[in-house]
Image (tube, grey):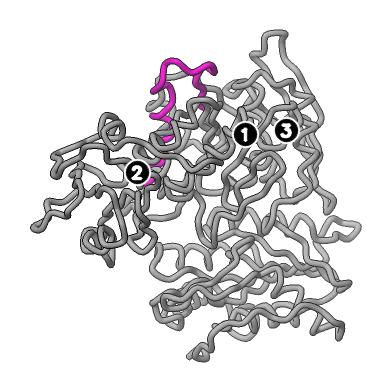
Amino acid sequence: MNKPSLKLMQCIGILPGIREINGNMPNVTYNDVTYDSRKVKPGSIYVAIPGISTDGHDYILAAVQNGASAVIGCKSIPVLPSVPYIRVEDSREAMAWAVAALYGFPSESMTVIGVTGTDGKTTTSIYLYNILRAAGLHTGMISTVSAMIDDEELDTGFHVTTPESPDIQRYLAMMRDKGVTHVIIESTSHGLVQKRVSAIDFDIAVVTNITHEHLDFHNSRQAYFEAKGMLFQKLGENQDRKVPPLAVLNYDDPDSYNFLDNLISVRKVAYSANGHIHHASATIREINSSPAGIKAIARFTDLPNGPVETEVRTSLLGNYNGANFLAAMTAAIYGLGIDPSTAAFGIANVIGVPGRMQVINEGQNFTAIVDFAHTPNALEKALIAARKMLPVDTYGNPQGRIIAVYGSAGLRDREKRRMMPDVSSRYADITVLTAEDPRTEPLNKILKEMADEAVDKGAVIGKTLFIEPDRREAIRKGLSLANPGDIVLSLGKGHEQSMCFETTEYLWDDRTAMHAALCEMLGKEGPEMPHLPDVEPYK
């Protein structure tokens, strides 16, 4: 992709919320947009963003010294820089528009589908990506796991779901230049509130569910719902789009359905994996789950040629994935006119989603699984799915136990520390509590909050509850407790490639750790256990 450049005056003409402009601007051009003063190079626009611990406005002079051609900020500053300073209402939103203009507004030439929700966004996005590929469409995707440009994969970072706007617009420009016609963007509540997906024309919006998560950021459940709703409010903003805007809602999640149903003014269609045929156009009539995956019969009504039923198979584990593939099929069938049988073929092509109910097999006589479940809702679904995978006797009684290894992140929603042990007390036989990105919070404090709740729900320390702050040892502990036929799940990290202690990201992969621990147990060669910093024993 050729390095772009644009006259600053052209950018100013489209920036939202301009309050004032200072400085002389004849012939000023820019070729990059960044919010990191250390990455400023000659020709960059530096965008000053107020943060929780630092304020980008404090680094304006450093950015200018590094060669910034202009500065965008949202504060009046006492000393104006020697380059144009554009004060706006929201510097994050202005950044998105400035970089979109630089790349020629790439989303305008593609059909854009946004997928949001608390759980299931990545899996639904990957299902949809494969459906569109099966339909012969040149497709791109930006998800938790990676960015895809047809068959080319790009890494999007350690803990990032929706990248910042300079990255997302760059990915979109690369997709456009390579002939991509349809793109799927996993849109988080953070990404929506922080305007990372501003200046993007969405045609279709899909919601998986809205459950308990991120209240540390949004402060209230209402604010969290409103953040998700921002994606749907963006539908139809550009009246010149080729695809009529469509909202895809989950009828089985009544809170999100009712909230969004009242918010949306464009065409909408509902899906129901629980078979609410009188309220949803896309439903699942029957579903069967096994260790090999899911087989279901999906029914689609309100189609031009009448109702259609099709068999859907997926190797992904857990009945809850029925809702994920149904959401993807609904968007493709009702939003893009893709045939249901083609959509089902695309679903079957999904071999697995990294870190989602991913089986780790080193020849042991029990099942080991890594999953991303890091919310109460996702934890419950993962544990229920695992229980259905246990072998049963002739009377249908499970023959095996569920052992859950998980933690709760520091500096994040503390309410989850109560809710998640409550879930595992009901659906797991043994719980091992451990670290999950403690950041600058004392790990023992986090674990005590969780352990107290687990004990209050009936867990017995040393019998059904174990506390091991070192995640390496926690995984080893969970595996050591397993009997033949049991299922051990390491939850909360999934595909992620790092874990944060204090302010340092340490390279970490639960899947590598599980392989390493299993090989140690079985006395065979395997990968080295990832390194983590030493932690205090639980007290």
**Badge 2 amino acid:** Tyr
Single out the residue that lies furthest toward the right. 394
Q: Residues within 10 Å of mark 2 (few under 14, many from 20)?
A: many
Residues at circles 1 and 2 in contact by the CB criterion of under 8 Å: no
Q: Distance between the residues labelled 3 and 2?
A: 36 Å
Residue at the (69%, 82%) spot, across then down:
477
N-term mark: 1 or 2: 2
Whether residue 452 is visible to the viewer of this picture, yes or no, is no
Q: Which amino acid does label 1 sit on?
A: Ala
Say what secondary structure mark 3 lies in: helix
First to last magenta residue range: 224-247
Would you name the residue on which mark 2 appears? 30
Point out residue 143 in the picture as x, y percentages from the top left corner. Answer: 57, 47
Of marks 3 and 1, the one in the foreground = 3
Q: Residue lying furthest top in this view?
A: 305
Q: Name the residue that disc number 1 marks.
A: 327
Q: Residue 274 at what x, y percent from top left?
A: 65, 35
Q: Distance between the residues labelled 1 and 2?
A: 41 Å
Rendered residue at 45%/15% (across/down): 240
As drawn, 376 above or below 476? above
* 31 displayed left or right of 248: left
- What residue sits right under mark 3 in the picture? 133
Q: Earlier in the sequence, mark 3 or mark 1?
A: 3
> Which numbered disc, 3 or 2, marks the residue that appears first in the sequence?
2
Q: Where is residue 134 in the image (x, y as percent from the top left)?
A: 76, 31
